[in-house]
Amino acid sequence: MIIALFVVAAATGSSLRYLVSENLNHTFPTGTLLVNIVASFAIGVLSQLGSDWQVVIGIGALGALSTWSTVANEAAEMARERQGALALLYVAATTTTGVVAAWLGLRLAGWL
């Protein structure tokens, strides 16, 4: 049953990332950055729970929602379009905000 839930969660997370990215990524990958921040925060909160739901939601849904392969692809595309500085800014912003969001999620979970 956990495997089936995991598959549904992963499909939901990746579909949501696609929809957000399609609607918000225009001149900058704002949608991808946003879903990575939200997923990082939620993973921080979930890491305190420890159960099968952590696997289903944390790895399945949130792991599919946030993805480094999308960040890498978008940064490479920016670099190919001679927007190397913007690509570096995007990767730095994704990394920094992701770590801060996960830390905030951990802190919030500790306060619950």
Image (tube, helix red, strand yellow):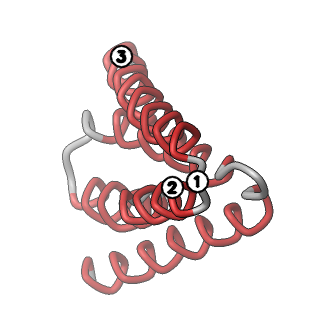
Give how far across and how far down residue 108 sits, in percent: 42, 19
Camera-nearest residue between 76 and 25: 76
Give how far across and how far down residue 10 sits, in percent: 41, 74
Which residue type carries mark 3? Arg
- 40 left or right, relative to 86: left
Which residue type carries mark 1? Arg
Q: Which numbered dot is residue 82?
A: 1
Which residue type carries mark 2? Ala
Distance between the alpha carbons at the discs numbered 2 and 1: 5 Å
Q: Which numbered dot is residue 107?
A: 3
* Numbered disc in front, either 2 or 3: 2
Q: In which quarter of the image is residue 52?
A: bottom left
Q: In which quarter of the image is the C terminus?
A: top left
- 102 left or right, relative to 14: left
- 61 left or right, relative to 110: right
Which residue is depicted at the point 44% across and 41% down?
A: 91
- Residue holding disc 2: 79
Which residue is depicted at the point 25% across and 33% down?
A: 48
Mark 2 crowd level (few <14, some 14–19, many ≥20, 10 Å Cα) = some
Mark 2–mark 1 CB contact (< 8 Å):
yes
Mark 3 crowd level (few <14, some 14–19, many ≥20, 10 Å Cα) = some
**SS for tag 1?**
loop
Distance between the alpha carbons at the discs numbered 2 and 3: 36 Å
Choose the circle earlier in sequence order: 3 or 1: 1
**SS for tag 2?**
helix
Residue 14 in the image: above or below residue 107 = below
Choose the circle earlier in sequence order: 2 or 3: 2
Q: In which quarter of the image is residue 5?
A: bottom left
Distance between the alpha carbons at the discs numbered 3 and 1: 39 Å
Camera-nearest residue between 31 and 61: 31
**SS for tag 3?**
helix
- 51 left or right, relative to 20: left
